[in-house]
Image (cartoon, grey):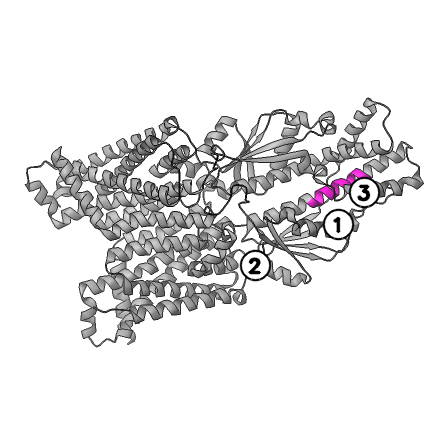
Amino acid sequence: MLNKLIAIIRKDLALRFNGPTELVFFLILPLVFTWLVGGGLPQEMTDPRIVVPVVDEDDGAQAAAFLEALGLSETIRPETRSRDEAEKQLDGNDIGAYLIIPAGFSDTLTADSLQAGDAAEIVLRSAPNSNIGLVAQQEAARAVGRIARPLLVARESLAAVESVHPFVDDAARAAYFDDTLAAAAAEPPAERVVFTVAAAGQTEVYSQRAQSSAGQLVTWVFIPLLGASGLFVMERALGTLRRLMVTPTRKSTFLLGAIGGQFLVALVQMALLILFGIYVMKVPWGQDPAALAVVLVAFGLCGVALGTALGAFVKTESQASNLSIMLGMVMALLGGAWWPMEMFPAGMQQVVKVLPTTWAMSALTDITMRGQGLANILPETAVLLAFAAVFFVVGVWRFRFE
Amino acid sequence: MNKILIIMWKDISLLWRDRTALILVIAGPLALTLGMGLVTGSFNRSDDAPAVSEIPVAIVDHDDGELAQPLIDLFTGPDLSDLVSAEVWEDEAAALEEVRAGRVAAVIVIPDGFSQSFVPDMTTGDSPAPVALQVYGDPGSPIRAGIVRSIAEEFTARAETGVTTIRLSLTELATSGAVPPEQLPDVGRALSEGLLTGDASTSTSGLIRVRTETAAAGDDDQGFNLLSYFAPAMALLFLMYAVTLGARTLLSERREGTLARMLAAPVTPGQVLGGKVAGIFLGGFIQMAVLILLTTVMFRLNWGNPLGVLLLVAAAALAATGWGLLIASLSSNDSQISAMGMALTLIFGIVSGSFIPGQSFGPVMNAAARLTPNRWALDGFMSLAAGDGLAGIAAPVAALSVMAVVLFVASAMLMRRRQTDLLTG
């Protein structure tokens, strides 16, 4: 039986890799996409912060202070631009957001204006289809916090002192404001919030490289596994399945060989993509090899089982090819392979749990980003295996040899 | 000309009779647009609803002091109820397990002595050593964890500012002799009320506001619909695939011998190629037009100026046809065209930002995106959806036309070299 299995697997591999084009989908495109989506270009590797242009229409001291404070951000990299240039880039979808420091910004932050209760403003213009706006908003608020603190202290202290003991004249008031402002600015604020990434062995707040490595693996392994349905259809159409059945080969041996071959190829593909993730993208895939192996096996079984189930229903190779691409892309997209699941609406995050890709991404994110081990990914693995069992039962039950 | 039209019409008829191909080029983009709409909440998000909502947060209070309760109230109160869904946990270890497993976006631990560390000595104004809030974020939810961190920082900054204010004020009142030393504690306590937890006016955001504007949104009364981005993005993605299907017929007809039969009829090779090219173009054009009509009806999308949409669809289909021809001229069999076409479709899709908007890709990738018809056409469709007129699409239409001319010339040169081979095999 083993010889027959090996022969069937060899035959399927020869059919699948009969030209160089299969390599494009098996390895080249997955690697290119992992690299590009993970921000693999040299500039992004040295400074992975997102570029957020700043239009400085004020050109005053407070604007310069704001820019300096913004430059301390760990997630965005401010670059000054003209307004036309920034707007053109936003229109052209080259950037996700930009900030404007309006003219008069510094003037609004003088003693007189502050005491008059005037508020200054920073304008954030963001693209409607971008989450960079959210990130830029957080970082702008943090930079505002840094530069506004001394001003706020000076204003509030002036009011507090004045409420107890009025100043003798305006000059004394102004002098006190200036002195307090200088004293508050000279005093670095105490660290009152310590932010820690809640993951073993992780220091990055978020890793686009890990998201890309896991997401592209799910996408590019899942599509060809669904495409395994095309092999069954082709053999059925050519009548080779019927011929195979006149040989002393049991149906179960054929199915095991056909499914096993695709499964083994998927394991090899996943291993190559993970090695690329480890050595090129520097993704911590190897924190718990046992957990990783368990998830990959469960995911591979689930994919090939769905491919088998599809193979029982589709009628032509073209149908199989189109359906596997469409289903694979949609399931990967909705499973969080392209965008972090946190960007999905709360209700949608529950709905997409009906997809195996969601569980695979959840387990791979647990391993790469959260540093979780075998015990923590067992629930996702169990769900993937349950999906695999259901798809296999449907696929084998409805399988037609003629 | 008549012969070219006949060949073109034959190809269109063949394409539209292929039900599985039709399902892919029409249902595919619709399904992906629907998926994108569901993922981004475009079907149920009101304009003022936050893009991220109901962030799950666990708060562990070991402090039980004056500032701990206002902090808990801030996270659990009505002001942040849309944005944050916070719960108080007793067990710190269990809460941390929740964030490590990704079940909550962040855990805030209020350590013992946190509140007390803000209270200065009311006589000297000196502050105790600071005790920091511990915020643990889920690395799988960077934006949500970042928002929780920002809210916590805003809260502590307000209190920290209050402490500094009280200290400097007491120092001034003491050194100027305005308040006798024995009255300083009472004055300090009076000042501390309101300054530590304060209202919005005593916060940094009350001093400098960050106002957000959404580009292309708000230009009309209904605001921007994210589907206005994803619908053209997906339609253009599958336009590339559709032209590949068309280009494939060039080589599949050669394989099946029907090209040779056509050449035996009184038509020139130029007319055959012209008919095939026109068929590819018209197939892509019709596919885009059908998708625009369907998304207008199904998703109530406003694509903008109809003449502009028509021009842009024509220009995009022309440029995509150019790419299809180039692939055909470089391939030696139809399976090569399929593989190269699918690869190019996906590469163009990702580079142009069809799946992940390309704003975070950096300048090199943005320059590469300009080689794709997807990106130029997407820019044009975004302009039209934002209410721009024909002037807004002048650059995309010009770029797509130039791209088409360059690709047509390159394909013609490659095909001329192997015309006999291409037509007769």
Per the rendering, the mark at residue B192 is 3
Q: Subunit of mark 3?
A: B
- Is A219 situated above or below A313? above
N-term mark: 1 or 2: 1
Percent x, y of residue B240: 30, 43
x 15%, y 36%: residue: B5
Check disc 1 and give the amino acid type: Leu
Q: Nearer the viewer, residue A10 or B373?
A: B373
Q: Is residue B409 magenta?
A: no
Instruction: Identify the subunit bearing mark 1.
Output: B
The reply to whether callout 1 and callout 2 are in contact (CB within 8 Å) is: no
Residue B239 vertical position relative to residue A290 in the rendered view, above or below: above
**Image quarter of residue A152:** top right
Q: Residue at x 33, y 58 (%)?
A: A224
Residue on which the image places disc 1: B67
Q: Amino acid at mark 2?
A: Arg
The span shown in magenta is B155-166
Q: CA distance from mark 3 to mark 2?
A: 38 Å
Local SS, label 1 = loop
- The answer as to whether the residues below labels 3 and 1 share one chain is yes
Q: Residue B116 location, x and y as percent? A: 79, 50
Same chain for marks 1 and 2? yes
Number of callouts: 3
Helix, strand or loop at label 2? It is: loop
